[in-house]
């Protein structure tokens, strides 16, 4: 599994992937994408990561890979970078996920907080959502499924092979969301192999 490792909390994703016995490859330049089953974009500072993506030519490379079917999972800043639209910002982004996000959207009083987030498809027990200067999704395009809301605000979405969360499942011990993403990656791999066979 590729994990974008330009800035931010990428190490926590590796620790989470280890619990699923999945090997991590740090992605720092376009050639690192060769052969990865999926890509995780971590939390951090989305403006910084966005600038580094452009500098390394990774913005173009990731967009092309997504176009060719690469699954991507973004958490927090990762979700912001995946979004097509960011309220009040022209910052560099991948723009692959048909949503509008608002940054630092929960307000200053609640800079960081934790809350139980119900994601029915991952089971009856809620996911512990760790929110750190988190964004939320203010609107979604027609191909986007809302996976979870917190206080009416959309905080997790999926659009085909693209998964995004406003919070940080990698900072908990609950690996269900990573497992779900891994399933998406394995499905994509099967589709690819199937299509080369015939
Ligand atoms: N507030 C950050 C941003 O806008 C995201 C914070 C995070 O990833 N924990 O980039």
Image (cartoon, grey):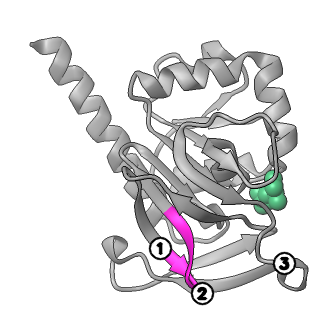
Q: Is residue 155 visible?
A: yes
Q: Is residue 144 left or right of residue 174?
A: left
1 and 2 marks in contact (CB < 8 Å):
no
- Which residue is found at the position 81% from the left and 40% from the top? 90
Say whether mark 2 is within 8 Å of ligand 1.
no
1 and 3 marks in contact (CB < 8 Å):
no
Circle 2 residues within 10 Å: few <14, some 14–19, many ≥20: few
**Is 3 rendered above or below residue 141?**
above
**Magenta stretch: dominant SS?**
strand
- Label 1 vs label 3, nearer the camera: 3
**Is 129 rendered above or below residue 185?**
below
Q: Is residue 162 left or right of residue 109?
A: left
Q: Is residue 41 visible?
A: no
Tag shown at residue 148: 1
Q: Which comes sooner in the sequence, label 1 or label 3? A: 3
Q: Of residues 173 and 117, which is closer to you in this image?
A: 117
SS at mark 3? loop
Residue 53 found in image quarter: top right
- Which residue is found at the position 60% from the left and 87% from the top? 151
Q: Is residue 20 left or right of residue 6?
A: left
Residue 61: percent from left, percent from top: 60, 18
The magenta stretch spans residue 37: no
Q: Which residues are magenta?
A: 148-156
CA–CA distance in space, label 1 to label 2: 10 Å
- Which residue is found at the position 47% from the left and 35% from the top? 38
Residue on which the image places disc 2? 151
3 and 2 marks in contact (CB < 8 Å):
no
CA–CA distance in space, label 3 to label 2: 13 Å
Residue on which the image places disc 3? 107
**Is 65 rendered above or below residue 77?**
above
């Amino acid at each position: 599994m590729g994990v974008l490792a330009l800035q931010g909390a990428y190490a926590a994703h590796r620790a989470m992937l280890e619990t699923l016995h999945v090997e991590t490859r740090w992605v720092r330049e376009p050639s690192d994408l060769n052969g990865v089953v999926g890509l995780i974009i971590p939390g951090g500072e989305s403006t910084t990561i966005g600038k580094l993506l452009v500098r390394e030519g990774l913005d173009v490379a990731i967009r092309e890979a997504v176009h060719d079917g690469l699954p991507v999972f973004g958490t927090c800043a990762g979700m912001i970078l995946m979004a097509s639209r960011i309220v009040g910002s022209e910052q560099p982004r991948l723009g692959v996920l048909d949503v509008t996000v608002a940054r630092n959207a929960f307000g200053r009083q609640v800079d960081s907080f934790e809350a139980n987030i119900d994601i029915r498809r991952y089971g009856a027990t809620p996911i512990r959502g760790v929110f750190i200067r988190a964004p939320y999704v203010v609107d979604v395009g027609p191909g986007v499924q809302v996976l979870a809301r917190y206080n009416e605000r959309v905080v997790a979405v999926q659009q085909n092979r693209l998964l995004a969360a406003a919070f940080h499942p990698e900072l908990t011990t609950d690996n269900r969301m990573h497992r779900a993403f891994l399933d998406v990656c394995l499905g994509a791999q099967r589709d690819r192999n199937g299509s080369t066979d015939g």
